[in-house]
Amino acid sequence: MVKSRIEKVFYMFSSVDTLGKIIVSIFSFVVNAFVLNVLFVVYILIGGILLGFFPALSTLFITVRFLFKNKEKKESIIRFYNKSYFSSFWETNKIGYMYLLPGVLLVFAVIYFAPYEHIIIKIVYFITLFIFSIYLLVFPHLFMMYSHFELSFKQYLKEPLMVFFISLRENIMLVLGYIVIMLISYNYPIFIPLLFPSSFVFLTVFILLNHYDKLHENKT
């Protein structure tokens, strides 16, 4: 009887401790997400918008990966973000704009083919639309790969596409997760400052991190 009561008390305290950890984790996520969203906007402006976007986005991935890998972090997010941003500034711009070019061409192709009703042109339109969908899903892999591997410029241009095709389960999870975030944002606009863009990056890193760790083990 005494043992049973002791077990109940122990369970009660362990439950409170677990609940406390969950609350702290949620609070930590909210704070980190908001800080990263602010840093993302600030550093885009520091880079002059056009030159600031890709370094700010790649640094967002690097920082979120750092948070996942270093739960007992000692370095501040702001200091880490600033250091990573400037150390990768020119390389991420080159990689980002090289990837952006085919995307712009695909968008123009989709817009150009959309009004036509001819069956052959419609087939070309849907093929182009399909390729563009794949292109959009390769982008998360590009930035995840940049935050995870040290590769050459040419490897960053081809490896993300190769990894995309061997990551079917992860790609499906990413799409479903992005849809959920967009639905929340649409129905509850008050959460937009919290959700964009860091929640997409947190989700991407959460889904892909173990997968990329395994790829890293296979490479070594």
Image (cartoon, helix red, strand yellow):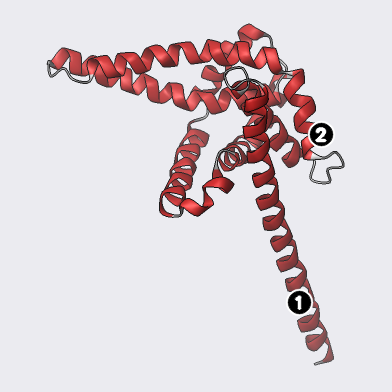
Quick check: 32 above or below 128? below
Residue 215 seen anywhere in this rendered image of the structure: no
Q: Which residue is mark 2?
A: 79
Amino acid type indicated by mark 2:
Arg
| Residue at (32, 22) in percent of width and height | 129
Residue extending furthest toward the right: 74
Residue 11: numbered disc: 1
Q: Position of residue 58 (x, y in %)?
A: 65, 26
Q: Position of residue 100 (x, y in %)?
A: 49, 15
Quadrant holding the C terminus: top right
| Residue at (79, 45) in percent of width and height | 71
Tell us which disc is closer to us: 2 or 1: 2
Query: Could you tell me how far apart the alpha carbons at marks 2 and 1 are, in whole angstroms?
Result: 41 Å
Q: Position of residue 12 (x, y in %)?
A: 75, 78
Residue 47: numbered disc: none
Residue 60 seen anywhere in this rendered image of the structure: yes
